[in-house]
Amino acid sequence: MIFYKSLLELDGANMISILSFDSRSMEALLGDHHADHFSDEFPLIYKTKILKKNNPNKFFYRSAIDNALKNN
Amino acid sequence: MRAIQIIINYICRYQNNFVSSFLFLKNFGAIVEKGSIELNEILDSEVFHFNFDYDGWISNHTNDESYTRAYNKSIFDLRQSYREVFPEEDLFGPIDDDKESSKVYKINFHVNLLPSVCDHFTIHHKTGSIDYHE
């Protein structure tokens, strides 16, 4: 449910890829207290297709790990 | 770096599958270089390592030695690539029918995906061209 809801609302992304630069957000989203909602059937970490700012016809793929690495 | 650690721990727990290895294709070197991220769990997980059992690959043999071989084509072609990975006709030798059944061992095949992360070369599965991946 988390997977479908986030995929539809955030243009294919989810809050994890958006907030991955912040460790406290990651702890809040991916902590064990949410374990009941996690399932290996619906992955939360994946690459998101992002349009380039200077050329909307081109795009690239970036994951939550890439975002976290870029901003830390 | 704590955020990356949390994400990696999540992957080890809930996305523990070789499919997740594509998340690390271009950044694993940078993660290792950080030095402060514990990677033992993901290196021991099934993200970079998986077992397979295809019909075209032998499953039992009297030779129980371990071999390490390079495979540089698409993972989707692996099923038909037994002869390419083991081109030597007599590497394993024919199954000796005279031996006792207890001497026939089950053969396991594993793929280590770590060589495909970071900078590496691949052979295109259709054109045969050699591509360099950064």
Image (tube, rainbow, N blue to C red):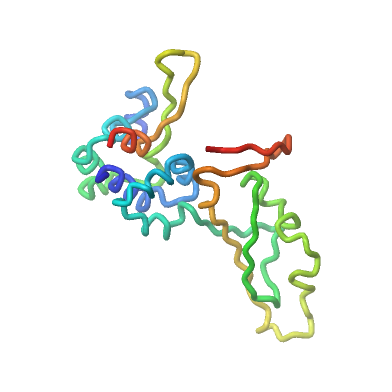
Among the 4 quarters of the image, the one containing residue A54: top left
Q: Is residue A33 above or below residue B45?
A: above
In the rendering, at what x and y percent does residue B105 appear? 64, 76
Quarter of the image with the C terminus of chain A is: top left
Q: Is residue B115 left or right of residue A45?
A: right
In the rendering, at what x and y percent does residue B72 appear? 65, 48
Residue occupying image coordinates x 72% and y 51%: B80
Quarter of the image with the N terminus of chain A is: top left
Among the 4 quarters of the image, the one containing residue B99: bottom right
Number of callouts: 0
Among the 4 quarters of the image, the one containing residue B103: bottom right
Residue occupying image coordinates x 26% and y 48%: A35
Residue occupying image coordinates x 50% and y 46%: B117
Residue nearest the viewer, comparing B27 with B111: B27
In the rendering, at what x and y percent does residue A55 appear? 46, 13
Q: Is residue A13 above or below residue B74?
A: above
Q: Is residue B110 above or below residue A5?
A: below
In the rendering, at what x and y percent does residue A67 appear? 34, 33
Q: Is residue A24 above or below residue A15?
A: below
Residue nearest the viewer, comparing B119 with A58: B119
Residue occupying image coordinates x 43% and y 19%: A51
